[in-house]
Image (cartoon, rainbow, N blue to C red):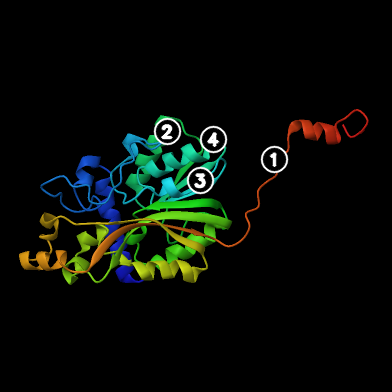
């Protein structure tokens, strides 16, 4: 990892350690929770989880930019990995879908977030969720583990997005898939937004062009790439004014540059092998009948 990548990671880790201690309202009134709050409350990026099955209020820090679990096609018994799991909200929603038969793994590189998520899981007595500390561009899981991967407004924070997408491919089972919500750009941001480290931690300056993002996914070998949802993001003027002059804010708002939240779905090629479910009665009939002599 080069020095610049490490510096950006350290910035994000430090900022999100502080965010872990903030309330949802404070995070929602800023840009992904990472910048100084606007003087009005704006839900700049987040979607409302409150009516979603499995939602846990204590785990909702208001940091997402979509509802990837809504589109993730999670089935009972699936193993699901959440990248950048934060306080655990998407993991708890995923657990509702995968059931007690499945398994959910949350990965986050911020120790404070891991601690908060584990506390939430223990309160709920969820034994099939675990939270692992680590980078999502070098995931602490083996190959071909996950049926489904979800992530909510996290890849934009990682300097080497191509490497993360390669890791997603590695840990998915053949035939597995992901549904990821993220921030992308159409057109070029003003340099002041790109260069500001705090804005990087706030999701925007770390975002890449939409076409480049989708090309990374295609080049990795994923199939059936689908945009499940797309919505424009407008940064309020009183936040933009931290970085731009009054005229620059006006020009930015009137330009063709767009910031979007997208939810992307894609599949790893191959056929998922499922373990056959054998009923006890079938085993008894096959082996343990009085005439079989095998028991």
- Percent across and percent down for residue 54 are 42, 36
Residue identified by numbered label 3: 74
Residue identified by numbered label 1: 277
Residue identified by numbered label 2: 122
Of circles 3 and 4, the one toward us is: 3
47 horizontally vs 150: left or right: left
Q: Secondary structure at mark 4?
A: loop
- Percent across and percent down for residue 5 are 33, 67
N-terminal label among 1 and 3: 3
Residue identified by numbered label 4: 100
As drawn, the label of residue 235 is none
N-terminal label among 4 and 2: 4
From the viewer's perspective, is residue 132 above or below residue 204? above
Q: Quadrant of the C terminus?
A: top right
Could you tell me how far apart the alpha carbons at marks 2 and 3 are, in whole angstroms? 23 Å
N-terminal label among 4 and 1: 4
Q: For this rendering, which residue is in front, 257 or 31? A: 257
N-terminal label among 3 and 4: 3
Could you tell me how far apart the alpha carbons at marks 1 and 2 are, in whole angstroms? 31 Å
Q: Secondary structure at mark 3?
A: loop
Viewer can see residue 1: no
N-terminal label among 2 and 3: 3
């Amino acid at each position: 990892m080069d020095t610049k990548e490490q510096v950006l990671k350290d910035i994000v880790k430090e900022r999100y350690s502080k965010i872990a201690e903030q309330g949802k309202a404070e995070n929602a009134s800023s840009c992904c929770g990472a910048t100084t709050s606007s003087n009005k409350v704006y839900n700049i990026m987040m979607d409302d989880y409150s009516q979603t099955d499995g939602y846990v209020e204590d785990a909702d820090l208001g940091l997402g930019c979509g509802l990837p679990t809504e589109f993730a096609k999670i089935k009972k018994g699936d193993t699901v990995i959440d990248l950048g799991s934060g306080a655990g909200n998407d993991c708890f929603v995923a657990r509702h879908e995968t059931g007690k038969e499945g398994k959910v793994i949350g990965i986050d590189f911020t120790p404070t977030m891991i601690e908060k998520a584990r506390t939430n899981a223990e309160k709920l007595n969820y034994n099939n969720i675990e939270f692992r500390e680590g980078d999502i561009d070098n995931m602490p899981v083996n190959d071909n583990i996950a049926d489904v991967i979800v992530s909510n407004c996290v890849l934009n924070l990682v300097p080497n997005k191509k490497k993360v997408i390669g890791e997603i491919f590695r840990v998915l089972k053949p035939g597995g898939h992901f549904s990821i919500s993220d921030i992308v750009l159409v057109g070029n941001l003003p340099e002041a937004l790109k260069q500001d480290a705090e804005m990087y931690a706030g999701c925007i300056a770390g975002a890449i062009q939409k076409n480049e993002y989708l090309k990374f996914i295609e080049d990795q070998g994923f199939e059936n790439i689908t945009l499940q949802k797309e919505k424009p993001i407008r940064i309020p003027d009183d936040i933009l004014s931290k970085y731009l002059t009054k005229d620059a804010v006006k020009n930015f708002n009137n330009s063709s540059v767009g910031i979007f939240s997208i939810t992307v779905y894609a599949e790893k090629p191959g056929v998922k092998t499922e373990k056959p479910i054998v009923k006890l009665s079938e085993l008894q009939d096959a082996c343990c009948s009085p005439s079989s002599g095998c028991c």
